Structures are given as structure tokens and as C-alpha cells.
Image (spheres, coloured by chain):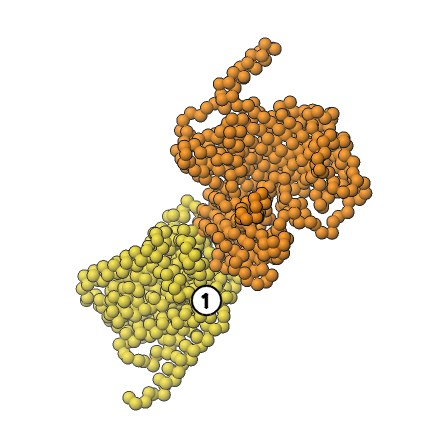
Chain colours: A orange, B yellow
Amino acid sequence: MKLALRWLLVFSSTCNLVYGLTTEIFDENLKINHLQDGRVSTTFTFETVLKGASPRDPRTLNTQDASQHYVLFPLTLGQILREYAVTELHLTLNAGNWNYDRWGYPEEKGVGTGAELWAWMGTGAPTSVDDRWKGLRNALAGLFCASLGSLDEQRTTSPTRSYFPQGVLPNWNGNSTHQLRHASLPSEHVCTENLTPFLKLLPCKSLSGVASLLNPHRLFDADWHGMSVHVLWLGAAGIKVRLTFQSLMDPLRSSISNNQNWSFQSLFDHTIERNCPAANSSTVQVTLPSSDSYSAVPEPPVVSGSLATYDVLTAQKPLDISVSRRGEFQYPSSFQAVAPISVTRTLQGFNQANGRLSLVLRNHRSVPQSLVYLETMPWLVQFHLHTLQARVEGRIHDDVISDISYTAAVPHSRPTTFQAMLRLPPNSVTRLNMDVDKAFLRYTEHPPDAQRGWDLPPAVLTPLILDTNGTHLSDEYRLGEPIYTSTLLVDVATPDFSMPYNVIIFTCSLVAFIFGSIFNLLTRKFVVLHLDSNQGN
Amino acid sequence: MSSKPLAEIKLSAASCAIIISRVACAFLGLSGVLKHDQLLSTSLSSYSQLKEGVFLFRNGLDPYSGGNFRHSPLLLALFSVILPESRTSASLIWTSFDLTGAWALISIWKARQNVGATSKDALINASYLLNPYVFLPTLALSSSTLQNTLTLLSIKFAAEGRASPSLFLLSILLHVDLSTILLLLPILLLLITDPHSHLASPHPLTANLRRTIPLFGKYILYTSILAIASTIITGGVQWIPQTWGATLTLPDLKPNPGMWWYFFTEIFDHFRPFFLMVFSVHLLIYVVPICIKFQYDPLYATFLLLGVLGTFKAYPTLSDPGLFLSTLAVFPEVFSYLRHPIVTALLHLHAALLMPLFNHLWLNTGTGNANFFYASTLVFACANGAALIDAIWAGMRIAIGREVQNYVVVQE
């Protein structure tokens, strides 16, 4: 047995030698923050770096790919990435609406409700980017048991002003280009069937290490939860896969004495029993409460500022970190805004044929704020761009909106992409209004439970931040963290689903009746008949 | 004649009153209320879509690259020059289209009667300007008003024997609405014959049909010049699938008073192309038989085909059947031979009251469903069909003359 194991070891190291000497590093981390409204945000991050690896050149898609041998890197994901030559991939599945005003920015910035998938893919392949995108979303749908297959042409856009590559895009032959494909499905519900395949991508599953805290019973009971998968190329450093799970727990909900105390046991109903042997590092970071007295058990070995860091690998097991504060939690009367703006988006009007899209933007800062505004809309809501109007404090301001790029929807296929630059005056409330038309769909296009309506994807507002690294003379802006608005529900008029046959029969009968009568008149001759008065007719 | 008869002065005063009241309507500001009314404008004729297209066009975006802009590039070019800033001025422009249409209708009447001015002019004027099917779409700023005006002008010039303006307007009309190709054959016949009433004395066509060939060539020439102009205006041929294609493939299923929208909402997907073909070809079927039967009176054939368009075209508004009903005023000789004018009128009354009501119940209050409105459009189609059938009957029946006692006129 031992001999066999040794041979296996030798064999696998030889394989490593043969297949490009890639080494894999796995790091896991759990970050716990206290939020203003008493909630606790937990963010699990699992990073695997495939050192020295590079994404597949799409021009080699016709040729045999090198065999893939991974120890820690998830093979199923790797196969999908290589099959469709995907350079960068971001998939998020969230449930709930992230409240930026109360919770600040999330640790993982993709918090749009439902499923969101975007990928950068190189061009020049024998198959088109759209074909590979189709294959990719179907493969991911199978991998994560999510309805990502519905992210079809009717939802796919390329909003290149809001979504930039987060890693490096390779330049294979000096002039290769990359294209972005983005789609979101706000009606997707995230649940435990998505978490199970997610856990399977981890080297230690949920058996040990930080991942052992991923207890679906508690995670899906949270006020907000979301998971994400990010694949990016770091250049020479290799390919990084980052799997994250965020959830927003509310210790006050289960607390009898209205205090904010929590422990692993109370949050996850689990403790860390043993280390994940594959992990290069395994840490838990807790943002300690700022002012009032608290006690953290066990005592954090490293505290820098308000951030306490525990090294799980060396900590005593079972590890159950708990933070308790004295006294009752005082619910704040107002929340300190972390994001520079807050947004409310609504669809107004009771009519099922048209409505009005309205966006209320509050700039909390005393300086003007520039934003990139992105709206992607399925074709069933059609914009009337000429009615777009910005009002600041009730007065029409033409200079709020600039630099519009617009791709109109095509009925039954392409969605609308609307991108614009907004400039909000300091400390102001800006209202954007635009009339929209609601489409009338074929009866087969309606989803089951058609009267519920359609979920519309969130808008994304990305603040532009003046880069303070340089001097004030250089007007260097960079994109800040995106702000996702809430999703909308549009009430689309429904036909009667029970009577397609009746409608076909009624209309055809009427057409046939009029047609028949006309041709009856046109083809027959008039004759004058003498009525025989004796017979009475 | 130094002084007009009193009756004539009264009638011209009536005409003036009608015109003034129509112009006054333009100032009521009803366009904001009516612009979304689905009976008055479809996506092919809606004013908001026109404004959207002009906005995109002015901002350097191609309005035909997507979206719901389905107006002809000719209208786009026209309104990107003269698009009025205020609703009132737009209403005035639209009312002036209607006034032009009424003037054309009176000219058609005069050409048919072969007289200078008659006492009936004011009645003809009223039949067009006071027809609610005609003036409500005008108040909603629907471009179907412009379509009606172009149709009437084209017929007017044809009735006066002026081939070039008539065919030019007809080819503009083809760019505005593909289904008006139905009118080509009767207008060609009208150009080689005369507009006078021969309904009472049917006779085979005496004019040489070969004379239509150069006229047809002229029509093709105008149409291609306009098509090239459209392509130059928009910088591509994208406008063809967006405008002409829309009438054939029905991408927009917004409710309208016609027969297509609910049928193609409910049709099974695998039958859709077949029935789109059937419904499109069905329109063309009427042209040749009606033109053969009424070869002695092509103006009447034109009128009947307006009725076919109003009943069966892909994206009708109320103004399409309205044009047919108003044009009926030009043919007073057939009135006494109509079989069931009361039934037709009641059907129209029924549909005209129920359609807006059921549309509102379905889409605004949510208390009725689509079937209610669909049923009322079926009644409307019955009304249009009844009017059309009756007009065909009366147009042929007039040749036999009055019934005498103990004799009855039937079809064999």
C-alpha cells in the first residue's frame, strides 16, 4: 500500500514536470464585519492560483488541447474555461437587495440581485465569440445547477464602459482583441442546489478549514446572501480562481437580550474542527467594534487597527471565535453614508402598455460627482430616449447627462444597452425620468405564472473617483466600486392563454366569411325573376 | 352670376364653420391624452415613435438599427426638418393635413360629377372633417392622417388625369405603408379612363390597357428613386426590414383595431410564417377581381379597395376604415341600393363604443382581459366587412335599376 502511494507520488510529480511545472496555491479567508444596523457580514474567500498558467489562445481551439492535470484547481471549471477559451470570467448568484445606504460597500462588489455572468473572450477563434458564450453559459448552468442557460441573446450585452477586465488580457500575436459578453437574470433564485456544486470546487469541500463553516441551513437563512466565481489572469503570476460566499447575518434576530454578540456557533451552527491540509494559508479576519468595550474569544493574536486576524492553521481546535459586547444594541437614528450617492429606481405608471422609468440620485458629498450609468433592459421594455429628462431640485438640467451611447432593443431578440455619463451637483437630489413602452408578447413568450410580471435587471452606477495618488494638476479619474440598483418588476399585458384555438378559429372564420361574401357577390350574375302571383311567392 | 343663391352661401358658411371648429380642436391640447391610444396610432404611425426616431437621427444614431421606429425614412427626413417643438403647432400641422385631405375629397367629387362647384361640397367636407374615425387620429398626431391625405391626393390627381403627381404620391404612399400597393391597379385604370360614374351602365373596358405600361414604369421609377433617397438618408438599407418588413412579419403585437395582432399573439409558433404569408397574400387577392368587375368605374374599384385595406391591413388605425366611410360620400348614387345600412351603422356604433372601453378595462384598470378587446375588434371587423360587402352589392345592383312589382332581383 505504501509502495503504491509512493509510486503515485512519483508519478504525479513527473506529470507536473511534463505539464509545464505548474504549482498551485490555495488560500482561504473569512472576513467578518460589523455593520451599522447591527448586522454582521461574513465573506468567505477561496483563492487558487495556478502559477505560470495562461488562458487558452482561441486560435488553437481547433487543435488538441494540452491535457489538464490539477491538484487543487477545480478541474470541472478548468475544462470549461479551456473548452471555450475564456480569458476572464465572473459569475455571481445573489439573493436579496444590497442596501448600500445602511450596509456600505460589500466586500465583493458584484451584488446585483439574481444571476450575473460576464466574460472576456479573445477573438480570432474558428468559432465566434457568441457561439463560445452560448457554450459557456450552458456549461456553467450545468456546473452550478442554475438557469444560466436562459441568459440568451435576449439578455446578452457588451457594456464596455462599466465592466473592465480585472486581470490582464493576454496579447497572443501582437494584435489580438478581446470582447466582453455580459448578461444578468434577476429572477434567478439562489439556493442550496447552487452551493453544493460550489463546495465541490473547493479542495477540502466543506469538510475542514474555513469552508466547514459553510452550513447551508444558516447561509440561506441570512438576510442577504450571494456567491460568486471569478477567474482572471494575473499575467506571469498565473491564473487565479476566486470563489466567494457572502452573507449578511442578523445576530439581533436570534438574540434574547437585544445584543450584537455572535460566535461561529451562533452564526453558522458549526465550528472549525480541523485544518484544510491543502491550504497554504487559512485566516479569519474580524473587524472589531470601534469604540465600546467588547471581548473577543479567543484573544486575537494579531490586531492591526481594528482588524483582528486569526491564523486557523495554528489556532487551537475546535476554533469558535466569538465577539461579545456589553449592553444593548442601540439602533442608529441615521446612517452614515459610505457610498458617495444613493439611488432609488422605480417603474411608474399603472398602464400595461407604457410607463415611466424613474431614477432618484442623491449626492451626499459636497463636491460634484461623476458617474457612469449603465442600463441594460430586455426588449420588452423599450425606451423613449427623447423623453429622458434630468431635474435637479425640480428644475430641468441639461448638463447632468452627457456622452450617451445607446443600442436600441430589437423585438424578440436583442436587449437595450444604455450608457451615459452623469454629473451630479454637490449635495443634491437629481431625478431622471424617461417614458418607456411595454411590449406585447406572443403567448408562447410569457413565462409560467405570466401575471407575476418580468424581473428587470439592476442598473449599475459606477462613480468616478479622482485619483489622489498624483498631483491635483492631473485629472486622472478611475472607476470606483459599482452601485447596483434594485431590480424592477414590470407588469406586461397578457393575452388569454386558454384559447389560442378559439382565436384562430374566430379570426379565420370572419376572414373567410367576408372573403366568401365578396367573391360570392363578384362571381355571380344578377337576374330579374318574375314572381308568379298565383303561387304566392 | 352676380350673387350666389342663399343656400350656397349657407353651405359655404357651414364649410367654414367646420374648418374653424377643426382648427379650434387643435388648440384643445388633446394630443397628450390621446397619443398612447392604441386605436388611434400603431407603432407604425405613432407620434412618440416618430419623435424618438427624429431624436436618434439628429443625435447621429441610426433609428433603424433596432427599436420600434418603423416610419419611412421619407417621414424621418421630413420631420427632422419641420418637427414642431410644441404640441399645438404639431396639432395645427396635422389639422392642415386633414384640411388638405378634405379639399382633395371635394376635388374627387367634382371630378366625378364633372362640375365646378356643387351644393354638396359642404356635405363632402363634413363627411371627412367631422368623421370621428378621421379626426381622432389627427388629434392623436398619428401619421395615418398623413397617409389618408396622400391617398386622397393621389386619387384626386388620378381622377383629374394628372398621371405624374398621382403616381408620385402613390409611390410616397408605398414608402409610408407597403399595403397601399393594392391601390396601384385601380389608379392606373383610373388614369387611362375617366372618373365619372358608370355604375348604372356597365360596359367592358374600352381604353387600351397597354397605356398603363408606361404609367407603371413611371411608378416603378418614382418608387426606386424614393427608395434610393431613403437609402441615402439613412446610410444603409436597414430601413427596409424595419418599415416594409414590419407589415409583413408583424414584430410588434400592440393591440390595434385590426384583425392581425391577436391572431399572431395567439398563433402557434410553427404556423406563424405560414399565416403571415396567408394574411399578406389575402390582401392582394381582392385587387384583380374587383378591378375586373368594376372595370367600367375604376374610381369605385379604388374606393372598394380602400375598404379592403381598412378591414384587413396589418397595422390599421381607426382612420383607415374612416377613410373608406368618408369616401362613400362621393358615391351618393349607390345609397338607395344599400341592403343593410342600418345594421352596418349599428355594428360600427357598437364597436366604436366598446373598443375604447374594453381597451381601457384590459390595460388600465385590469378588470377585463384581452378577450374583451379582441371581441370588440371582431365586431369592428364585422362592421367594416358589412360596409364593404354592402358597397360591392350596391355598386353592382344599381345597374339593374329600381325593382318593379312582381319582379325580384337576385343573383343566380
> Relative to B225, does residue A475 appear above or below in the rendering?
above
Q: Give the image location of residue A31, x and y in percent.
A: 67, 35
Q: Quadrant of the C terminus of chain A?
A: bottom left
Q: Give the image location of residue B139, x and y in percent.
A: 45, 68
Residue A98, quarter of picture = top right
Q: Quadrant of the N terminus of chain A?
A: top right
Residue B366, quarter of picture = bottom right
Name which residue type carries label 1: Glu
At horizontal 64% and vertical 38% (from top left) the residue drawn is A246
Q: Give the image location of residue B65, x and y in percent.
A: 41, 51
Which chain is disc 1 placed on? B
Circle 1 sits on which residue?
B85
Res. B375 visible in picture:
no
Res. A7 visible in picture:
yes
Q: Nearer the viewer, residue A233 or A80?
A: A233
> Relative to B182, does residue A53 appear above or below in the rendering?
above
Q: Nearer the viewer, residue B109 or A512?
A: B109
Q: Nearer the viewer, residue A423 or A129?
A: A423
